[in-house]
Amino acid sequence: MEIPELLAVFGLNEKKTSIYLAALEMGPSSALALAERANIKRTTVYDLIDELKRLGLITETIRGKRARYAATDPDRLKDLVRRQSLALEVLLPQLKALYNVPGVKPGVRYFEGIAGVQAALEDTLTAQDKTLLGILSMEDLYETIGEAYMEDYVKRRIAMGYKLRVVRSKEKEVAKRWPSSKKENRDRRYAPKGYVFGMTQYVYDNKVLLLSSRKENFAMVVESADYARNQRQLFEALWQVSQPAL
């Protein structure tokens, strides 16, 4: 198989492939230069570049008033495969639940191990509602899911436009990371003294995600409109008594 046929597996059509290959060959270049090299109309090149940026295959740097675009290391394709694999672990149970069954019914999905916990967390980035409600145990997140993965997840959450309203325990903080930030779509508060969370919880759409500590090493996604509504109300009650933190 030729390179364009292989790249099609990653969702790259003919035009995206042409831009990506041009960026690999040319190094940091202007959008116009890439368009000329790829024989693509300049009016469409920016949309194509934006899609390649979203996939993590092209980066943008600003020098003065000029933007330069460069291809990332081709090893980035391995990250795409990993993310697709994680997404598939989340997606298959949902599709099977819908298969030959009318409507959406409440259900619980259980995940084990690091890969399973990561796959469960990926589900939050499929939410239709762009606001996630989180109760986070930073110490346990780092230990269970890994610092590098969490940093990558946060970057993708921000890039995809998801806002996070989060309550954290001061006792479980591990570093001065992830403060309240409009740029990073994050509004953080600290729970009252003595409220120490040993697990992490996200509420999104009609779902509630629970992430355990490293000791038990599991995740669970509960899909139930009633349960999600109940957890939203409990979150709002906790939010009101929590302290704003910059």
Image (cartoon, helix red, strand yellow):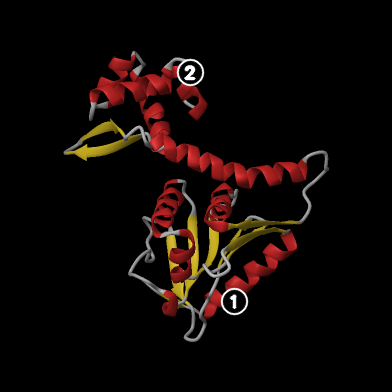
* Residue indicated by mark 2: 5
Q: Which mark is residue 211?
A: none
- What amino acid does circle 1 point to? Ala
Q: Nearer the viewer, residue 243 or 9?
A: 9
Question: In the rendering, at what x and y percent does residue 198 appear?
Answer: 53, 74
Quarter of the C terminus within the rendering: bottom left
Q: Amino acid at mark 2?
A: Glu
Left or right: 28 as drawn, with respect to 21: left
At x 29%, y 21%, the residue is 34
> Seen from this angle, which residue lies furthest bottom?
194
Could you say where residue 32 lies in the image, as x and y percent from the top left? Answer: 27, 22
Label 1 element class: helix
Between 157 and 199, the one nearer to me in the picture:
199
Residue 158 lies, with reference to residue 179, above or below; the image says above
Which residue lies at the image location 46% right of the left edge and 77% below the top edge? 169
Side (left or right) of 176 relative to 92:
left
From the viewer's perspective, is 163 left or right of 38? Answer: right
Note whether 107 is above or below 25 in the view shown.
below
Residue 33 in which image quadrant: top left
Residue behind mark 1: 237
Q: Can the viewer see residue 226? A: yes
Q: Position of residue 171 (x, y in %)?
A: 43, 80
Relative to 83, say whether 142 is above or below.
below
In three-dimensional space, the C-alpha distance between marks 2 and 1, rounded to whole angstroms, equals 53 Å
User: How far across and down, in percent of the image, does residue 118 sit?
Assistant: 53, 53
